[in-house]
Amino acid sequence: ENRSGRLVDRTEELGLSIHQGFWNGVAVGDFNNDGLLDIVATNIGENTPYQDVESHPIRLYYGDLDWDGRVDLVEAYYVDELGCYAPMRKLHEYSSIRTILQNVQSHREFATSCMEDIFGERIKESPFKEINTSSTMIFLNTGDDFIAQKLPDQAQVTTAHAALVSDFNNDGNEDIFLAQNMHYTRPQMSRQDAGRGLILLGNGKGDFRPLDIKESGINIMGDQRAAVSSDINRDGKTDIVVTQNNGMTRLYKNMSSNQGIKVTLSGPFQNQNAIGSSMQVRYSDNTVGPKRIINSSSSYWSQSSFTQVIGLDSSKQPSHLEIRWPDGTVNNVEIEGLNEINLKYNRR
């Protein structure tokens, strides 16, 4: 949190520090239309050996365990039968750590030994990191803290990297796109290739419906990484560009029947792209749509378009678009009949 130019770490205070994952990408969006920015964080998914163990997290010990001047890495999990942590991998995978051969005489002994029995007292002094979730999830902002919520099963079948937040069907609720898969894993672990690129349609209440390939039209079998959103052909619909590791970059044109409002903000000289500005549709019945913010980055090694496409709830009568600039200046723009807004910053 920025407090008068000084950054203060509030991770623990906001309830986020208890969720320790293999986090890859992070994006923000208002998933329940309450005007507070929520978080979507991508993870390795639930189709790996690293299963969720909240009471006894998976550990990664690191340090020079055999005094050879090199850093060793050892993954460990808690074994109830032993009442202690033990190595996750097989004995032959630790052949480079010489102390194992001194303390373990057989595969059977290795399989029934604790970390201290195998690596000696050195392991007690070694630092470690812990992982207690492998799920890709959202964190709903209550204003005081964040509530964790797993995304649907289709988001958990493989590793996810980039996460895009946009209203892809222009229904007035924020949706999510996930770039998926991880082909290059260690030899003993199968590659993560069950994803085809996933669109999750939001309902404005924090819930999402995954689209299959036939519904979304997205079918990327490769190793997806970065992704950006932009109205490439200026038709008022958000298109998607996805890069692949060792594969072609793919562009998907949005063929939704609904058209949104294109909004381009021009900020002052020091911030010409109006980064940090937000916009939110207000309806005549005093309800609001999701808050959209202009970011300087897009989740995973990428930058989406600064021009936003804002969808509307067709069951309601829109009143105006509230635009809030980084310095707190507010502009209210009537949007009835508009399909494009271009607004320059003008401090009054």
Image (cartoon, rainbow, N blue to C red):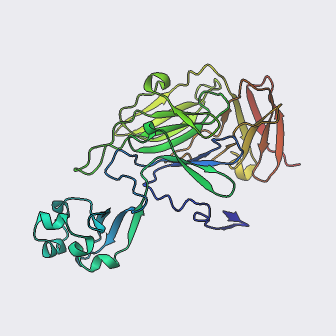
Q: Residue at x 56, y 44 (%)?
A: 303
Residue at the top extreme of this rendering:
257
Residue 220 or 93: which is nearer the viewer? 93
19 or 94: which is nearer to us?
19
Percent coordinates x, y for residue 219 in the rendering: 41, 28
Total tally of numbered discs in the picture: 0
Q: Please provide percent x and percent y for residue 322.
A: 79, 40
In the image, farthest residue toward the left: 105
Q: Nearer the viewer, residue 98 or 130?
A: 130
Which residue is pictured at 39% across the width and 36% down the height? Answer: 195
In the picture, measured across the screen, residue 57 lies left or right of residue 227, that is left
Place residue 103 in its image quadrant.
Answer: bottom left
Residue 16: % across, % down: 56, 59
Q: Position of residue 61 (x, y in %)?
A: 33, 68
On screen, residue 151 above or below 7:
above
Task: Determine the residue positioned at 58% across, 60% down.
Answer: 15
On the question of residue 296 being in view, the answer is: no
Image quadrant in which the N terminus is located = bottom right
Compared across the picture, whether 296 is left or right of 302 comes to right
What residue lies at 14% left-to-right and 68% top-to-bottom?
A: 109
Can residue 153 be seen here? The reply is: yes
Q: Is residue 324 left or right of residue 204?
A: right
Q: Judge whether 345 appears above or below 108 on screen.
A: above
Taking 140 as reference, is 210 above or below it?
above
Which residue sits furthest front?
81
> In the image, 63: left or right of 130?
left
